[in-house]
Amino acid sequence: MTIELYDLAGANPDHRFSPFCWRARMALAHKRLAVETVPVRFMEKDKLAFSGQGLVPVIRDGQKIVSDSWAIAEYLDAAYPERPMLMDGAQGRALANFARHYSQSVMGPAILKAVLLDIHNAIDAGDRAYFRETREKRVGATLEAFTASPEAALAGVKAALAPLRALLQTQPFVNGDRPALADYCVFGPLMWARNVSKVKLLEADDPVLAWREKMLDLFDGLARKSAGAGA
Ligand SMILES: N[C@@H](CCC(=O)N[C@@H](CS)C(=O)NCC(=O)O)C(=O)O
């Protein structure tokens, strides 16, 4: 049966950039599950009413409804243990959990400094007032002031990626010799930047870029084929 993934969309409904939705999208592909994505704009909360909350990603798998990207990954491993595991054993889960928190509390905020205004410009005109109000309240500055120092933002991203860079100099994937949920957690914010902004966060010789290229190619180029900045 095809699983529905409710996924944040920009002005163009094929334009998908949410870091949490990319985490879920890659997790579903890892499990080799058939997926149909449903685009949801910020002002389309009615599409999520069935889930009892207002954030994406949400999946609907038959009768089962799961929101929150981490809960979705846990559900997929529990419901489909015969398929490739996203978190293999207690140590795989611990690694993925670290990657989740590093992604959300270190990478995400650093990348936000570089791309927040680009997100505003990529979303539907009808979403912009809501986005501006909620995000300006969250960051304590106007979108323009928050993103006024692109060079400092890039330096911040470079510093935030230092542990990932060091790790990827010693192993091909965050998870070790093959990708799993830990990789998808870290990949999410990079897809956010790739698909919403033209800014080059990664230098040509950065091992993080080489790893990102491999991630873009996974699952028959699922992420690479997705609509990028300017879509
Ligand atoms: N902890 C949640 C976070 C989900 C989240 O923050 N989703 C954002 C998109 S990246 C959202 O739905 N935002 C809608 C809004 O702000 O109204 C997860 O891991 O899925």
Image (cartoon, rainbow, N blue to C red):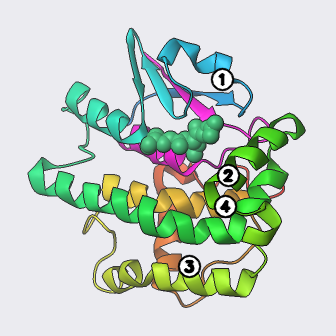
Place of residue 143 in the rendered image (x, y in percent of width and height, measured from the top left): 77, 61
Mark 1 vs mark 2: in front: 2
Identify which amino acid the numbered label 1 is placed on.
Lys
- Looking at marks 3 and 2 on the same chain, the residue that comes earlier in the sequence is marked by 2
- Judging by the rendered image, the residue that carries numbered circle 1 is 45
Place of residue 2 in the rendered image (x, y in percent of width and height, measured from the top left): 47, 19
Residue drawn where x is 31% and y is 80% of the image: 167
Mark 3 vs mark 2: in front: 2
Bounds of the magenta segment: 1-30
Circle 2: element type: helix
Circle 4: element type: loop
Place of residue 156 in the rendered image (x, y in percent of width and height, measured from the top left): 57, 82
Asked whether residue 4 is drawn in magenta, I would say yes
Mark 4 vs mark 1: in front: 4
Residue drawn where x is 56% and y is 79% of the image: 157
* Residue 25 visible somewhere in the drawing: no
Q: Which numbered disc covers residue 140? A: 4
Establish whether ligand 1 lies closer than 8 Å to the Cβ of label 1: yes
- 130 relative to 197, above or below: above
Label 4 with label 2: CB-CB less than 8 Å: yes
Circle 1: element type: helix
Place of residue 67 in the rendered image (x, y in percent of width and height, measured from the top left): 43, 29
- Judging by the rendered image, the residue that carries numbered circle 3 is 157
